[in-house]
Image (tube, rainbow, N blue to C red):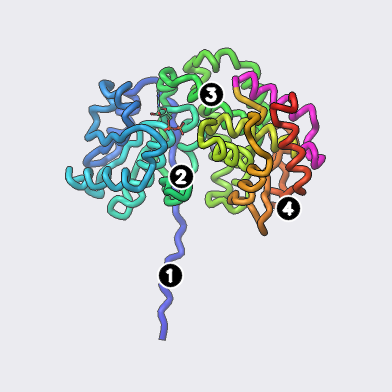
Amino acid sequence: MHYDVNLKRNVDESYPILVVKSQQEIIDEISQLSYNKYALITDSNVQKLYGRTTLFSMGSVFSFEAGEQNKKIETVLSICEKMQGEGFGRDSLIIALGGGVVGDMAGFAASIYMRGIDYIQIPTTTLAIADSSVGGKTGVDTKYGKNLLGAFKQPIAVYVYPEFCKTLPETEYLNGMAETIKHGMIADASFCDYLEVNREMILKRDVDVLGKVALSNCKIKAGVVEKDPHEKGLRRILNYGHTIGHAIEHISKFKLSHGQAVSIGMAVEGKIACMLGNLEIKSLQRQNKLLSDYGLPIVIPDEFNIDDILEIIKLDKKSKNGLARFSLPCDIGRMSKFDGEWASSAEEPIIRGAISESLSRDGH
Ligand code: ADP
Ligand code: ZN
């Protein structure tokens, strides 16, 4: 005897991304949604900077000590238990206000709280605006690595208020520019033109230009995620620069920021694309100039060892049969399809060659 439980589902997880001109606009939008209680999750830095602004008066504030080292299950658990202590039910809304660390943890809390409640994202870093607030990846780190526990959980809305970027330290601010240039490289040559032409305004943090950049970033990333929500193929292109980038970020013990590591990763992987004959040198040079013009590094610091990098890239999630694979551009704004895999392995001498040419001691 048997019974088939038939749970085939066709779910609609669409949501809007709004660029707003004031905090009040966000509050007005949220107030139109019918939730009983609001839990604003943030970190100590954002609370210090913005704790007296109107957003913080929307509901209870659950703040944790800023820093990636606190992106762990214990922090999520403590927030969830505090919410339960304050009687937050299923009809509550979680508001994630902060950078990627806040967004990942608040989204994860939303995915498990009473088996899942709604949440919205209000990203306050360029990196979170450009990257982590779209795509629905949430989670925490464990002692074995980054983002090893988590869930796919889409927010019900994302509100981008570019003014928040004004208080970011310079390196944090530039961090998001690496992912921004990556987006131009993988999908939109005209966006690369825009980044070249409007560099001064972007570096000055002009809020109107930042709003436009934010929207282009979201459109490009969302366009990819829509076609491949669970990372089966196309979504790998978002990983451009990240095979090498993650390895050197890891080896540097996170002294290099994610944006700096990805920038170097794009320079090395772009080089691999050239060596494989997929990309013209002049396109690589244009990419590298764009990265450097935004104050991002394109050479690997001296103390790095090629063998360490080669060892770590084999562990990358795109690896197949123990071989590292790379998502590679074939032009500005276009990636190589590689039989629908959107990633390709490369012979070790090529990877070694590309890395060694990118080491600063070689004078490149
Ligand atoms: P990400 O760069 O991945 O978005 P974090 O969430 O770690 O990562 O944010 C980076 C740092 O910037 C953290 O120390 C955070 O507290 C701080 N921060 C977040 N938003 C702002 C802001 N608008 N102004 C200043 N600092 C901020
Ligand atoms: Zn990234």
Q: Is residue 289 magenta?
A: yes
Amino acid of disc 1: Asn
Residue under label 1, please give it: 6
Residue under label 4, please give it: 339
**Secondary-structure class at tag 3:** helix
Q: Tell me the mark number nearer the camera, choosing from 2 and 3.
A: 3
Q: CA distance from mark 2 to mark 3?
A: 23 Å
Residue 85 place in picture, x, y as percent = 17, 45
Q: Quadrant of residue 221?
A: top right
Amino acid of disc 3: Leu
Task: Give whichever of 251, 158 is nearer the camera.
Answer: 251
- Determine the residue positioned at 57% across, 29% down: 260
- Residue 94 relative to residue 218: left or right: left
Q: Tell me the mark number nearer the camera, choosing from 2 and 1.
A: 2
Q: Residues within 10 Å of mark 2 (few under 14, many from 20)?
A: many
Residue 32 visible here: no
Can you say which quadrant of the picture contains the C terminus? top right
Start-end of magenta stretch: 273-295
Residue under label 2, please give it: 136
**Secondary-structure class at tag 4:** loop
Image quarter for ligand 1 equals top left
Residue under label 3, please give it: 174
